[in-house]
């Protein structure tokens, strides 16, 4: 039987909430903070823009694979040691990005930077699942969601300021400083997974754990919902710049709109955490998301004004944020005994689904394809929420 640890007996509550929230922000920090420096990096390495964009793709692949790696080994060695190792690897990879003189090696270092950053993301969920359950776990994921929303706003905006004042290398020095800060936080962190609750790291045990997880109906449905949520977010990230450009918005205003919509994610994530029944949150949110996706599609296909587009997208994001918190809570709450591998699969599948869907936006007219994708994803989410019973495993 699993020993339940109260987070407040192991780590101060405010410290744990803030620390896990910051760990979860490594995704937007590593991906978004340096985007405005693409032209500078292109010039520095005497290369073409497509090669610099490859550094973003390699980092995304690293983020997906790293969650599988660190989530799996954390079930065997605990959370603290793998987290510390991932942060030290992150520091080394960041120094590598600053030191290499070839775009090829820069792309490689970005892969390892993403791989290492994934440890912080996946272990933030695992530590939360070790430390909390029920409504407390929902509250924790709500806090993580709010901090992520703020980070999503600040990363590209603050990155742009840093690049304009200190150049592209300043961004990576800032990431290095963040990594050092999190190393000190990890030193203060107390282990959340007792040795008695750890699983052996061998193929048979790993296959057995994965088999158990994949027969857990609650977990599978929650992961599917999370994948659909990520698909919606990635679809918007891929389509919105082109759509807003057609409305005549400048690059600065496009960044501002992204920030406003990220605030919607943060607000709804916090509200959802206080609603209690996460199954009901998903059912209600998915229904409204479908309605708003249809409204959004109508505004796109009829080329309605910008505010009609932004209003429907903002409201859609309000329900997307709630679904993100609810699906995270259901998935991790149902697999607290295998929190490491469960968190790894959750994160990897989310990034994989988002990565597969987002390129589809470029097929044909962006207004038509994004409309179809938004409606299809929300319809699938709504059908899943209302057709699958989640009362037991």
Image (spheres, rainbow, N blue to C red):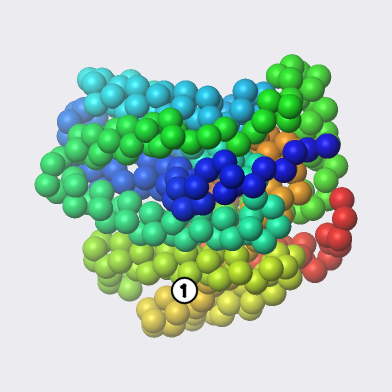
- Please tell me which residue lies in front, 39 or 336: 336
- Please tell me which residue lies in front, 82 or 361: 82
Q: Quadrant of residue 71?
A: top right
Q: Is residue 155 above or below residue 247?
A: above
32 vs 12, left or right, is left
Q: Which residue is mark 1?
A: 314
Q: Quadrant of residue 240?
A: bottom left
Residue 208 lies, in percent from the top left, at: 83, 27
Q: Is residue 178 above or below residue 70?
A: below
User: Which residue: 57% across, 49% down?
Assistant: 8
Residue 325 lies, in percent from the top left, at: 60, 59
User: Which residue: 37% across, 45% down?
Assistant: 29
319 vs 214, left or right, is left
Residue 133 lies, in percent from the top left, at: 69, 52
**Residue 66 visible in the current orientation:** no
SS at badge 1? helix
């Amino acid at each position: 039987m699993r020993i339940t640890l109260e987070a407040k007996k192991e780590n101060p509550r405010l410290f744990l909430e803030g620390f896990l929230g910051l760990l979860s922000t490594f995704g937007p920090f590593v991906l978004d903070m340096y985007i405005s420096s693409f032209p500078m990096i292109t010039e520095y390495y005497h290369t073409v823009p497509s090669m610099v964009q490859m550094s973003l793709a390699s980092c995304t692949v690293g983020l997906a694979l790293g969650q599988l790696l660190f989530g799996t080994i954390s079930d065997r060695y605990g959370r603290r040691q793998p987290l510390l190792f991932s942060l030290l690897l992150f520091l080394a990879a960041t120094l590598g990005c600053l030191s290499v003189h070839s775009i090829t090696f820069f792309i490689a270092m970005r892969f390892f930077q993403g791989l290492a950053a994934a440890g912080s993301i996946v272990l933030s969920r695992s530590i939360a699942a070790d430390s909390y359950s029920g409504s407390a776990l929902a509250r924790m994921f709500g806090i993580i969601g709010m901090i992520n929303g703020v980070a999503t706003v600040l990363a590209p905006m603050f990155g742009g300021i840093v690049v304009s004042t200190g150049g592209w290398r300043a961004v990576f020095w800032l990431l290095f400083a963040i990594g050092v800060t999190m190393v000190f936080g990890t030193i203060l962190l107390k282990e959340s997974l007792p040795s008695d609750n750890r699983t052996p790291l061998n193929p048979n045990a790993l296959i057995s754990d994965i088999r158990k997880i994949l027969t857990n109906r609650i977990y599978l449905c929650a992961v599917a919902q999370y994948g659909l949520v990520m698909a919606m977010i990635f679809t918007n990230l891929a389509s919105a710049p082109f759509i807003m450009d057609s409305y005549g918005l400048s690059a600065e205003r496009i960044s501002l709109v992204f920030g406003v919509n990220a605030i919607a994610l943060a607000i709804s994530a916090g509200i959802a955490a206080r609603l209690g029944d996460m199954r009901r949150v998903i059912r209600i949110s998915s229904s409204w998301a479908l309605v708003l996706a249809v409204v959004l599609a109508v505004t796109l296909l009829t080329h309605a004004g910008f505010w009609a587009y932004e209003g429907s997208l903002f409201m859609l994001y309000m329900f997307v944020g709630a679904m993100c918190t609810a699906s995270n809570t259901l998935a991790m709450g149902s697999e607290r005994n295998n929190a490491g591998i469960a968190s790894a699969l959750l994160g990897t599948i989310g990034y994989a689904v988002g990565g597969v869907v987002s390129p589809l936006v470029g097929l044909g007219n962006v207004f038509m394809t994004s409309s179809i994708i938004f409606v299809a994803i929300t319809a699938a989410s709504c059908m899943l929420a209302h057709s699958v019973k989640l009362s037991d495993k």
